[in-house]
Image (spheres, helix red, strand yellow):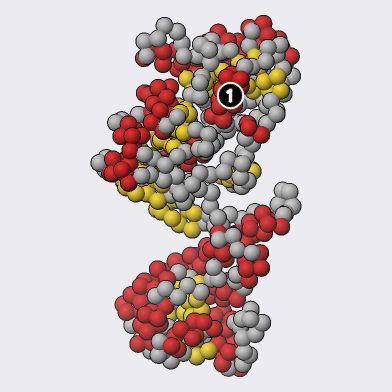
C-alpha cells in the first residue's frame, strides 16, 4: 500500500544525459536532501560545488571494470527496495548499515543514439546499460516508498511536489513516475533485443518479440475524434520519411495525415530520382494518381489528371527537391501535405502563403529494397512481418503469351507494378507513358477492381474531352494472380494491350489462353504484392 506522502531525505543521481542536472541537484540540496552519485555525475555535481557522496563510499567498493560495476550492491539496492513500514526490512537496513534512498534519478546509457549513428558493434554493446535499468526497476517496484525519475522533463514536477508537500512526494506522482520508468526500461530492452536480432540473427520466428518507441508527438485524436492517438519514433537509424521529416509550416499532422503521408512517400520512393521526376498523390492511403515526368510539375500534372476529384484534400509526395514551379501548381488546389526530400527557398515561400498546407522535408528517400518489419495489432496479439522489399526492377519477367511486350509496354508494365505494390488489395493499375490512368483498389473481387479502374480511365477521358478511354493503349498491373480470366478480359475490354501479374494460379493456363485470344502480351513476375 503506497503511503500518501514520503519525505525525501536522500537521493541517488546517476545520469548519462546531464541536461538540467546541476540546477535540479541544487534545488534538492537546498531542501536538505543528501546527494549520492556515481562516476561522471559525481564529478559534475562536485565541480558545481555541491556536497555529494560517491557511491563507492556507500558500497565500500570502488568502481571497477571501466565503470561496468558500481551500483550492483546491497548498499544501493537495499536502500531502494526496503519497505519503510516492514520491521524485517528496517532491521536488515540497520544491521548492515544501509541507508534508505527516497529518490532515484537515472537516465540510461545512450544505446538508441549509438545504434542510430551506426557505430561499431563494440560501441553499441558498451552502451548497453546494466546497473541503470536494475536500479530503475528496483525503485519503480518500490514506488510506495521511492520516487524514480528517468526523464529530465520530470524534474520540475518533482520539485513542485517537494515544495507543495514540505519536502515529500505524493503517491500519485510516484505511481506515474514508476509506470514511466517501467515503460522506459521496456523500450530500452526492446531496442537492444531488436538490434541484436538484426545484427546477429535470431530464431525464426523468435519466441519473444518486443517493440518500443519514444513519444514524438501527441495527436489530437486517432482515425476518428473519439480515439486517442500519438506518434512514436522507433529506436535505431530511421528510414527517411515521416519520422525523419522537418515540418516547415502548417498545422499539426493528424493520425490520418501521418498514415497517408507515409504511404505516399513509400510509393514515390519506388521511382529513382536519377531516372526521372515522380509524383504520387495519395488519398486514404491509396494512390489516386502517380506519374513520372521530365520535371516535377509535369509529373504532378500527369498524376493529377488520373483522378483530380480524389486528389482534392490529398497528400502529394515528390522524389526530388520541390521547386517553385511545382509548388505553385500544387498549391492551386486544396492539399493536406506535401512531402519531399528537400525544397528550394522559392518553393518554401510559395507554400508559406498557404498557412494550412503542411510542408515536410524528409532529407532523403526511403530505400524500397531496405529490410525491416511491419507490425499490426490484433485482439490479444501482434502480427509481425518483413517489409515488402521486392522491387520489380530486380524481378526476371517471364513472357508467357505468344506476343512479347514492346519496349514501351515493358517500361509501362514495370511502372504500373511499382504503383500496384502500394495500392490496397485487390489492386488493379492501368498505366500509359509513365502515368497512371485508372486505379482500382481494395475491392473484394479482382474483376470489380478491374472494372473500377477501367471506369476511372473512361471518366478521365470525358474530363479531357477525348473520344476514347484513357485505358486504350495502356498496360495493366495486378498485385496478385487472376484466379479467373474475367478480370483480365475486363482489362482487355477497356483497351489494355499488355498485362503484368505474379502468376501462380491453378488456372494460369486459362488466363494465358484468354490473353492470347485477346492479343495481349503478358509477363509474370513471380512476386505477389498483397497490401491489406
Residue 517, quarter of the rendered image = top right
Q: How many marks?
A: 1
Check the image and report above or below for 296 versus 105: above
Residue 172's place in the image compared with 48, above or below, is: above
Kindly identify the residue that appears in the image at 64 percent across and 43 percent down.
Answer: 386
- Residue shown at 56%/79% (left/top)? 81
Name the spot of residue 2 as percent of width and height, x first: 47, 73
Q: Position of residue 273 (x, y in %)?
A: 50, 37
Kindly identify the residue that appears in the image at 28 percent across and 40 percent down. Answer: 350
Comparing 297 with 517, the one in front is 297
The reply, left or right, for residue 70 in relation to residue 156 is right
For residue 308, side relative to residue 498 (left or right): left
Instruction: List x then y, in percent, for residue 347.
Output: 33, 41
Residue closer to the observer: 147 or 37? 37
Residue extending farthest to the left is 353
Residue pointed to by mark 1: 411
Taking the image as drawn, is residue 280 in sight? no
**Does 103 appear above or below 220?**
below
Question: Is residue 467 among the parts visible in the rendering?
Answer: yes
How many neighbours does mark 1 have within 10 angstroms: few (below 14), some (14-19), or many (20 or more)? Answer: some
Which residue is depicted at the point 53% across and 89% down?
A: 54
Task: State which quarter of the image contains the C terminus.
Answer: top right
Work out whether residue 157 or residue 355 is closer to the camera in this orientation and state it. 355
Helix, strand or loop status at disc 1: helix
Q: Position of residue 148 (x, y in %)?
A: 48, 74
Amino acid at each position: 500500500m503506497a503511503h500518501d506522502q514520503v519525505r525525501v531525505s536522500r537521493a541517488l543521481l546517476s545520469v548519462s544525459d546531464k541536461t538540467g542536472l546541476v540546477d535540479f541537484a541544487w534545488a534538492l540540496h537546498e531542501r536538505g536532501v543528501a546527494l549520492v552519485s556515481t562516476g561522471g555525475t559525481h564529478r559534475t555535481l562536485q565541480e558545481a560545488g555541491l556536497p555529494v557522496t560517491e557511491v563507492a563510499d556507500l558500497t565500500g567498493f570502488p568502481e571497477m571494470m571501466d565503470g561496468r560495476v558500481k551500483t550492483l550492491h546491497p548498499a544501493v539496492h537495499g536502500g531502494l527496495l526496503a519497505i519503510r513500514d516492514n520491521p524485517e526490512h528496517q532491521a536488515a537496513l540497520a544491521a548492515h548499515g544501509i541507508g534508505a534512498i527516497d529518490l532515484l534519478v537515472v537516465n540510461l546509457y545512450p544505446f538508441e543514439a549509438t545504434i542510430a549513428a551506426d557505430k561499431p558493434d563494440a560501441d553499441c554493446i558498451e552502451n548497453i546499460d546494466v546497473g541503470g535499468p536494475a536500479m530503475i526497476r528496483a525503485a519503480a517496484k518500490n514506488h510506495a516508498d521511492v520516487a524514480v525519475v528517468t526523464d529530465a522533463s520530470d524534474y520540475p514536477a518533482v520539485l513542485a511536489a517537494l515544495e507543495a508537500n514540505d519536502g515529500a512526494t505524493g503517491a500519485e506522482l510516484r505511481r506515474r513516475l514508476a509506470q514511466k520508468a517501467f515503460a522506459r526500461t521496456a523500450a530500452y530492452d526492446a531496442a537492444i533485443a531488436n538490434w541484436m536480432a538484426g545484427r546477429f540473427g535470431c530464431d525464426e520466428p523468435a519466441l519473444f518479440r518486443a517493440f518500443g518507441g519514444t513519444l514524438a508527438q501527441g495527436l489530437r485524436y486517432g482515425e476518428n475524434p473519439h480515439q486517442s492517438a500519438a506518434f512514436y519514433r522507433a529506436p535505431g537509424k530511421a528510414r527517411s520519411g515521416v519520422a525523419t521529416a522537418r515540418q516547415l509550416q502548417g498545422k499539426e499532422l493528424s493520425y490520418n495525415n501521418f498514415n497517408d503521408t507515409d504511404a505516399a512517400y513509400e510509393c514515390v520512393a519506388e521511382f529513382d530520382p536519377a531516372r526521372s521526376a515522380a509524383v504520387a498523390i495519395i488519398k486514404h492511403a491509396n494512390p489516386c494518381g502517380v506519374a513520372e515526368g521530365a520535371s516535377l510539375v509535369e509529373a504532378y500534372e500527369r498524376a493529377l489528371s488520373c483522378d483530380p476529384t480524389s486528389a482534392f484534400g490529398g497528400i502529394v509526395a515528390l522524389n526530388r527537391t520541390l521547386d517553385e514551379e511545382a509548388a505553385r501548381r500544387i498549391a492551386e488546389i486544396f492539399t493536406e501535405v506535401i512531402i519531399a526530400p528537400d525544397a528550394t527557398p522559392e518553393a518554401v515561400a510559395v507554400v508559406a502563403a498557404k498557412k494550412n498546407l503542411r510542408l515536410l522535408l524528409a532529407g532523403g528517400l526511403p530505400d524500397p529494397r531496405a529490410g525491416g518489419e511491419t507490425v499490426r495489432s490484433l485482439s490479444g496479439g501482434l502480427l509481425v512481418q518483413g517489409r515488402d522489399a521486392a522491387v520489380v526492377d530486380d524481378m526476371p519477367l517471364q513472357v508467357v503469351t505468344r506476343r512479347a511486350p514492346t519496349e514501351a509496354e515493358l517500361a509501362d508494365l514495370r511502372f504500373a507494378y511499382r504503383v500496384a505494390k502500394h495500392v490496397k488489395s485487390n489492386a488493379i493499375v492501368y498505366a500509359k507513358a509513365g502515368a497512371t490512368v485508372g486505379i482500382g483498389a481494395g475491392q473484394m473481387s479482382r474483376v470489380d477492381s478491374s472494372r473500377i479502374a477501367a471506369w476511372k480511365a473512361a471518366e478521365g477521358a470525358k474530363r479531357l474531352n477525348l473520344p476514347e478511354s484513357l485505358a486504350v493503349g495502356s498496360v495493366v498491373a495486378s498485385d496478385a494472380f487472376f484466379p479467373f480470366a474475367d478480370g483480365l478480359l475486363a482489362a482487355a475490354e477497356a483497351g489494355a494491350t499488355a498485362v503484368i501479374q505474379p502468376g501462380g494460379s491453378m488456372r494460369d493456363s486459362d488466363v494465358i489462353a484468354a490473353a492470347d485470344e485477346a492479343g495481349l502480351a503478358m509477363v509474370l513476375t513471380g512476386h505477389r504484392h498483397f497490401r491489406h
